[in-house]
Image (spheres, rainbow, N blue to C red):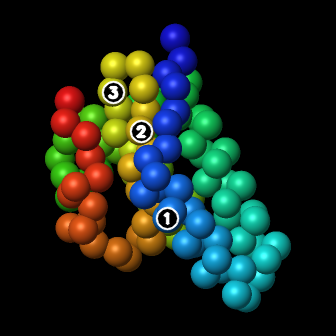
Amino acid sequence: MACSVVWSPEALNDVDDIASYIARDSVFYAAAVVQKILDTSRELSDFPQIGRMVPELSDEAIRERFVYSYRLIYQIHDEEILIVAIVHGKRLLDSLGDRFEEP
């Protein structure tokens, strides 16, 4: 059974910020990156375990997929996948602690 994929407001803001940043140099590439992020998030509906466990958090329910140099971080719930953040691969996750929901 497929899970529903839900985006947190913060993750949507992350995508907007990424698109704006990339669009300063290339609107085409910004659109391509956003499309790839969206496509990757849709795959999670059928295959929620496809991502690796986020090493910094050591929680089986919090996983990530890489999209170019960005980390799509999500949290698996019973019948829902919450997209928590889209961050650059070099960014530390310390500032994201308040984005995760309690089980």
Q: Earlier in the sequence, mark 3 or mark 1?
A: 1
C-beta proximity under 8 Å, tags 3 and 2: yes
Q: Nearer the viewer, residue 80 or 62?
A: 80
On screen, residue 25 above or below 49? below
Q: Residues within 10 Å of mark 1 (few under 14, many from 20)?
A: some
C-beta proximity under 8 Å, tags 2 and 1: no
Give x and y (percent) for residue 35: 71, 55
Q: Secondary structure at mark 2?
A: strand
Kindly identify the amino acid type of the residue bearing the numbered disc 3: His
In the image, 31: left or right of 85?
right
On screen, residue 97 above or below 75? below
Q: Nearer the viewer, residue 52 or 34?
A: 34
Q: Residue furthest right?
A: 28
Compute the Cα span from label 3 to label 2. 8 Å
Give x and y (percent) for residue 6: 49, 36
Q: Earlier in the sequence, mark 2 or mark 1?
A: 1
On screen, residue 95 above or below 85? below
- The quarter of the picture where residue 51 lies is top left
Tell me the residue at 64%/48% (across/down).
Answer: 38
Tell me the residue at 41%/19% (across/down).
Answer: 79
Look at the image and tell me in which quarter the C terminus lies: top left
In the image, 91: left or right of 37?
left
Compute the Cα span from label 3 to label 1. 21 Å
Kindly identify the amino acid type of the residue bearing the numbered disc 1: Asp
The residue wearing badge 2 is: 82
The residue wearing badge 1 is: 14
Q: Secondary structure at mark 1?
A: helix
